[in-house]
Amino acid sequence: MLTLVILCSFNTSNASENALEFEHTIVNYNASVQGVDPKQAYFISLLALALDKSASRYGTFQMRAAMINMPQSRTLKMLAENKNIDVAWSMTSIKREAQLQAVYIPLLKGLMGYRIGIIRKGDQAQFDQLTSLEDLKKILMGQGLDWPDTNILNSNGFNVVPGPEKSLISMLLKNRFDYYPRALFEPWRDLARHSELVVEKNILIRYTAPIYFFVSKDNPRLAERIEYGLRVAIDDGSFNAMFYNHPITDGMLEKSELDKRKEFVLHNPLLSEKSASLLDEPKLWLTIKTATSIAVPLYN
């Protein structure tokens, strides 16, 4: 394993007499060997913001990147076993919250649950003809093998073709499925690389799907520190400033044209009671207006 220190940031001007001067927190997280992409950069920056905003109470910190290529499932397993990394970010589920300690702040304000589809250029006409939920359920959709989204879509009666994350675009191009749901900020990088693909124009699929920072159950103080720092950032506006102005989110609402879309609201059976209770805090979530909204009945 190659460990690279890529960020060491703490604001001593924020330190207070209440901080333990001897306390210094080292936080290891996973990053790709190929380099940090814009999506990873958002979560790394947000983690740094949380640690910085909590420095007055919890002391100084250092962030270190463990450069290991591995699927999300292995990352979370290593985190649970306290091996090599101290924090990870992932969409939540009841199972993940049982195995790991979640920091109950939606890092993307619920944005991961707003899904628009990537389709092959020339296929828009078949989606223009969709008039009902049953029509939509007949469409083959592609999702990652170990993504919670796959279980959410399946539980709502959709027709999902799972595959490795790195293969999903090629599977779409090879007609293995016809619709690749992605969070609002995700399609644009893929479209820039593949001129044969476009964003579908009419449909928005939405479900409550917060992404959290997770730590080991044996590290409650780190979870406490990160949550404290994130809540400080929410209250002082710096969280929203980063969210709305980061390269991965900047301009996404305009490009997605959500006011022209029909929204299908799904039930998320993987959502814990604790996560559902956060819906009572509007400041934690993104609110978006669509053309129409349809609640999908629970699938039996």
Image (spheres, rainbow, N blue to C red):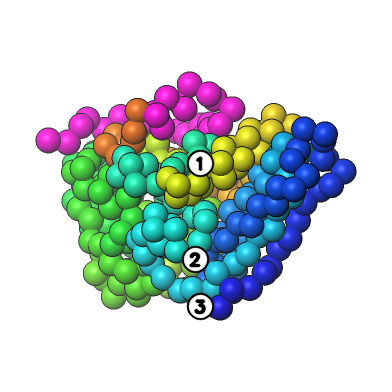
- What's under tag 1, amino acid-wise? Pro
Q: Which comes before the other along the chain, label 3 or label 1?
A: 3
Residue bearing the label numbered 3: 1
Residue bearing the label numbered 1: 220
Task: Report if residue 240 is visible in the image.
Answer: no
| Mark 3 Cα shell of 10 Å, populated few (<14), some (14-19), many (≥20) | few
Q: Which residues are magenta?
A: 274-300
Nearest the viewer among 284 and 254 is: 284
Residue bearing the label numbered 2: 84
The quarter holding residue 27 reads bottom right
Instruction: Estimate the x, y position of residue 242 in percent, counting from the top left.
Output: 69, 46
Task: Name the residue at 29% across, 34% down.
Answer: 267
Q: In the rendered structure, find residue 274 and report the number of the disc placed on it.
A: none
| Mark 2 Cα shell of 10 Å, populated few (<14), some (14-19), many (≥20) | some
Q: Which comes before the other along the chain, label 2 or label 3?
A: 3
Residue 178 magenta: no
Task: Name the residue at 41% across, 41% down.
Answer: 209
Q: Are marks 2 and 3 in contact (CB under 8 Å)?
A: yes
Q: Which comes before the other along the chain, label 2 or label 1?
A: 2
Task: Report if residue 73 is visible in the image.
Answer: yes
- Name of the residue lying farthest toward the top: 280
Instruction: Estimate the x, y position of residue 268 in percent, counting from the top left.
Output: 30, 37
